[in-house]
């Protein structure tokens, strides 16, 4: 297939290695419960490479770009057979990756670097989210206005690595996460705050915060409003940390044609995210078709908020570009906050794979910059239906 041969060669040149013009099958483990691409659509490929990406959570708009890449045939066009493995409470993506049970994983920088510090050879190959989404939320009548006000309070926290950004921010603010607050294990909903069992909870702009605003206020019979809550945006306070990026194993990338496979995977995924920027309703439908427990208005809110995290890149660069300065800021926050005991070495991220992916799309009409992106207005409904 000439077009595929051209793509492989361009990726190989961009990465600076001499790859063969065919790709062997990349090993992957069937973890069950995943979404796979339509292999019939790749029948014109000289060969098809099988890979798995493991997500941080269950099917929701946070991962819509990967679903779109599968549904729109972008993975097929790159001669890839992709299994999209959902995450869950017992799935730690970076550890699944490190164990060799997936070729790619979606994870946050701090969580991934904490795993790397334990000996895993995982490396960031593309940074999808360019902005952070961490919030601390309290009732407006709580008296909590800043992070310093959390001292001595009962605070909900997700744990399992999802507390690392908060932990780092609190430490910088002079609050010891382990002794200056009472930490309560927080479920992945807002029940602790709504029941006033804690003083503040963690939330993401695209998920849990919306759950509050789609809940009925029993005193008014209407949905809660934003002014019912105090929202502390960690990003606005200077504690922005890089979140969803795509990771692979260094050792795997060095084997055979795997760096080229990774570039093709990124290229197709970038197209999927570009599609979701411009086709919100279709991507929401794709998520709902995969059995999401959260409804259409919630997923539309999430898709809109996720697009805000991606588009446009603050530097004006294409999707997936990792800004070394933003990386350094994230690592510094984690180090200063005591989350990381040492700064990762220079091999913790690679820029060449993403650059190769962008080169693969140089003849495409896909807008990889999104300079004209404008968020939409979303009306939430009770329960996010």
Image (spheres, grey):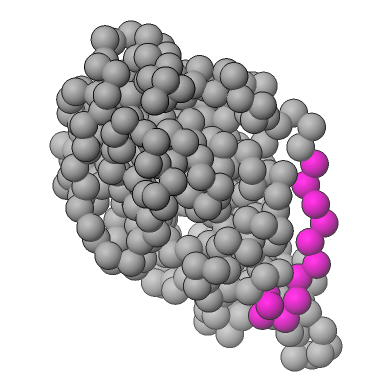
Q: Position of residue 77 (x, y in %)?
A: 47, 36
In the foreground, 27 or 94:
27
Q: Left or right of 89: which side holds 116?
A: left
Q: Left or right of 304: which side holds 73?
A: left
In the foreground, 33 or 89:
33
Residue at figure coordinates x 53%, y 76% from the top left: 293
Residue 38 in the image: above or below residue 172: below
Residue 382 in the image: above or below residue 346: below
Asked whether residue 315 appears in the rendered view, the answer is yes
Q: Which residues are magenta?
A: 374-385
The number of discs equals 0
Give the quadrant of residue 227.
bottom right
Residue at figure coordinates x 58%, y 85% from the top left: 195
Residue 101 in the image: above or below residue 262: below
Q: Left or right of 307: which side holds 218?
A: right
In the foreground, 226 or 171:
226
Residue 53 highlighted magenta (yes or no) = no
Magenta stretch: dominant secondary structure: loop
Q: Position of residue 366 (x, y in %)?
A: 64, 30
Tell me the quarter of the image containing the N terminus: top left
Give the quadrant of residue 35.
bottom left
Q: Position of residue 297 (x, y in %)?
A: 71, 69
Q: Position of residue 91 (x, y in %)?
A: 29, 61
Tell me the quarter of the image containing the C terminus: bottom right
Residue at figure coordinates x 83%, y 88% from the top left: 220
Residue at figure coordinates x 75%, y 91% from the top left: 218
In the foreground, 45 or 85:
45
Q: Left or right of 88: which side holds 65?
A: right
Asked whether residue 178 appears in the rendered view, the answer is no
């Amino acid at each position: 297939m000439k077009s595929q041969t051209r793509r492989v060669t361009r990726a190989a040149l961009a990465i600076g290695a001499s790859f063969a013009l065919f790709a062997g099958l990349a090993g992957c483990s069937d973890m069950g419960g995943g979404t796979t691409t339509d292999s019939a659509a790749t029948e014109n490929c000289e060969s098809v490479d099988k890979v798995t990406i493991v997500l941080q959570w269950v099917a929701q708009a946070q991962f819509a770009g990967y679903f779109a890449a599968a549904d729109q045939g972008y993975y097929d066009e790159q001669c890839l057979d992709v299994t999209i493995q959902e995450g869950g409470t017992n799935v730690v993506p970076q550890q699944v990756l490190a164990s060799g049970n997936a070729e790619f994983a979606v994870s946050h920088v701090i969580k991934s670097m904490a795993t790397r510090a334990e000996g895993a050879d995982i490396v960031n190959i593309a940074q999808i989210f360019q902005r952070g989404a961490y919030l601390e939320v309290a009732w407006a009548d709580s008296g909590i206005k800043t992070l310093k006000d959390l001292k001595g309070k009962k605070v909900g926290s997700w744990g399992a690595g999802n507390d690392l950004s908060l932990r780092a921010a609190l430490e910088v603010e002079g609050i010891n996460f382990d002794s200056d607050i009472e930490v309560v294990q927080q479920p992945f909903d807002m029940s602790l705050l709504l029941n006033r069992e804690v003083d503040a909870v963690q939330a993401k702009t695209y998920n849990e915060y919306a759950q509050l605003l789609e809940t009925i206020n029993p005193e008014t019979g209407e949905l809660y409003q934003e002014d019912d809550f105090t929202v502390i945006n960690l990003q606005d306070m200077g504690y922005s940390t890089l979140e969803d990026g795509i990771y692979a194993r260094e050792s795997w990338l060095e084997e055979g044609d795997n760096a080229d496979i990774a570039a093709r995977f990124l290229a197709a995924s970038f197209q999927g995210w570009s599609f979701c920027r411009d086709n919100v309703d279709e991507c929401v439908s794709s998520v709902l078709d995969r059995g999401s427990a959260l409804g259409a208005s919630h997923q539309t809110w999430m898709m809109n908020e996720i697009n805000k995290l991606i588009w446009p890149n603050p530097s004006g660069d294409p999707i997936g570009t990792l800004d070394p300065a933003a990386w350094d800021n994230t690592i510094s926050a984690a180090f200063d906050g005591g989350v990381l005991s040492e700064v990762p070495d220079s091999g913790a991220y690679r820029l060449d794979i993403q650059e190769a992916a962008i080169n693969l799309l140089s003849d495409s009409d896909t807008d990889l910059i999104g300079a004209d992106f404008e968020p939409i207005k979303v009306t939430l409904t009770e329960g996010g239906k």
